[in-house]
């Protein structure tokens, strides 16, 4: 299995603190030694870092941890390989362009090999993982159905239906983004927390690190972090249910109270 | 205008030396301050680094210069913006998946804005550059014509015809790869050099740096480096002609004498 990390924020925000916890699980406090990757969105643009080396001893992971890259949306993944050898082409997150948007995807879990019999549309996998195959299938279905992005409510409902189909084949915890919305789908484990004023301190489970978000943030900042397991031990994370999907935009779950009216 | 750098090698090779020269042109010895990017292929997998900051003072460029990433194919670009604002989504190289391969593209030059009237097929640009638009058009044409990769001779001829069409709209120096072949098309400036045994010393034009490739290589290594302008001042680089395309594979121009028979 693997570990997922996602972030949605209303202002460009760095994820150094959370990533510092996650990377320890890549060979240090966790067994996920088989590569890691992270995608940072700045507007419509995305930059990704991928490394088939364990994150806990990767020089590139060290850079990501220390060099604050400010972003609205982040998806990261550290891998413990099951289907597909350890290699760069099998290292999440995976990306494709759809509707002139860079979509990025990461998966925790394992699907029955029957998934490889599902007919693909436009997108073809480059590597050999069930995860990349599932993404190609899902994005191909979206593309088949819509020539351009539908309203977010309809898009979310369609993505949830497609995820429900994938879940029938096994464990399917997923983070997916179109550069603006972050779609989180849970089968077995996915948790999230929204941080907003008044900010407090958080202490990482996996590393000897405490951050006082009060010193790092502005009063109107809203940031949601999503992870397979809570990353901090002094905050309350929401555990998602099986089959539940949450859509985050600008730091908040969709349809929640916008910050301006709080 | 911009600077291009490409590499094709028969063994995984790092490009630290050449990149050290190129990055100086991003704000130090050259005016290309508007971002830079590089894509490294390892087998079918690719990892990219993109930064809208000048390469000469980018922390990520420093990592790429110092941390040897060994690769068969590399495409890099430093940008001096003309069409399209300075932003991450306008930072080369650009990539798309075609036939289950990650294709990567970088362009030096400028095309008439008429290019934006050319009808696109499957691929849509995310940013606003003429370059990304041209890539979407070119890959869309390939996809329309072939369901799967044709023989390399046919593929090369088709790519050259498409590049000839783009050249009618302006300056079009291009590097393009399907992860195995590196296609280099010249309108005004593109030079290349193949290094093989007996290896000698090379000294960078743009930085106070000399490398003795004899100490860095094995006798059977073959590496071709392609750049808009020669990167060294003590070697002879091949200058390409207007309308010329070269295809490099495993370090050599296609159809040249393979190393094993030398």
Image (cartoon, coloured by chain):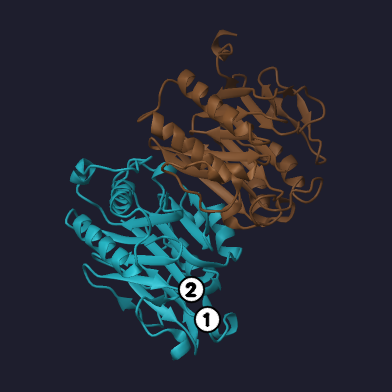
Chain colours: A brown, B cyan
Residue A225: tell me if it is visible: yes
Name the residue located 28 percent from the left edge and 51 percent from the top edge: B141
Can you give x and y, in whole percent of width and height, for residue B22 in the image? 44, 64
Mark 2 or mark 1: whose residue is earlier in sequence: 2
Answer yes or no: do the residues labelled 2 and 1 have beta carbons within 8 Å?
Answer: yes
Can you give x and y, in whole percent of width and height, for residue A42 in the image? 49, 37
Q: Residue furthest top?
A: A261
Under circle 2, the secondary element is strand
In terms of depth relative to the viewer, which is nearer, B80 or A140? A140
Report the number of numbered marks: 2
Quadrant of the rendered image containing residue A200: top right
Name the residue located 34 percent from the left edge and 47 percent from the top edge: B132
Question: Distance from label 2 to label 1 (Cα)?
Answer: 8 Å
**Residue A221 placement, left or right of A154:** right
Can you give x and y, in whole percent of width and height, for residue B52 in the image? 45, 47
Residue A11: tell me if it is visible: no
Query: Looking at the picture, does residue B11 appear above or below residue A254?
Result: below
Can you give x and y, in whole percent of width and height, for residue A128 in the image? 58, 53
How many residues crowd mark 2 within 10 Å: few (<14), some (14–19), many (20+)? many
In terms of depth relative to the viewer, which is nearer, B9 or B172? B9
| Quarter containing the N terminus of chain B | bottom left
Instruction: Identify the residue under disc 2.
Output: B9
In terms of depth relative to the viewer, which is nearer, B151 or B32? B151
**Residue B109 placement, left or right of A126:** left
Q: Chain of mark 2?
A: B
Instruction: Identify the residue under disc 1.
Output: B221
Name the residue located 60 percent from the left edge and 45 percent from the top edge: A130
Under circle 1, the secondary element is loop
**Tag on residue B34?**
none
| Both labels 2 and 1 in a single chain | yes
């Amino acid at each position: 299995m693997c570990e997922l990390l996602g972030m949605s924020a209303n202002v460009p925000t760095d994820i150094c603190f959370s990533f510092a916890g996650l990377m320890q699980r890549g060979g240090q406090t966790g067994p996920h030694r088989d590569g890691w990757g992270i995608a940072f969105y700045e507007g419509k643009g995305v930059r990704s870092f991928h490394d088939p080396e364990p994150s806990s001893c990767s020089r590139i992971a060290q850079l990501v941890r220390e060099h604050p890259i400010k972003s609205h949306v982040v998806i990261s993944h550290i891998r413990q390989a099951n289907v597909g050898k350890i290699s760069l082409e099998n290292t999440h997150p995976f990306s494709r362009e759809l509707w002139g948007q860079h979509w990025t995807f990461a998966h925790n879990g394992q699907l029955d090999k029957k998934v490889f019999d599902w007919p693909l549309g436009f997108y073809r996998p480059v590597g050999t993982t069930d995860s990349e195959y599932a993404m190609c299938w899902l994005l191909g279905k979206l593309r088949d159905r819509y020539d351009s992005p539908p309203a977010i409510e309809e898009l979310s409902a369609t993505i949830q239906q497609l995820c429900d189909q994938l879940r029938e084949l096994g464990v399917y915890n997923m983070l997916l983004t179109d550069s603006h919305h972050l779609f989180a789908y849970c089968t077995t484990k996915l948790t999230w927390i929204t941080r907003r004023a008044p900010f407090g301190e958080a202490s990482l489970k996996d590393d000897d690190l405490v951050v006082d978000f009060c010193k790092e943030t502005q009063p109107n900042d809203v940031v949601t972090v999503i992870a397979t397991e809570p990353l901090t031990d002094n905050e309350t994370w929401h555990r998602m249910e099986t089959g539940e999907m949450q859509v985050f935009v600008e730091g908040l779950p969709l349809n929640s109270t916008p910050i301006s009216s709080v």
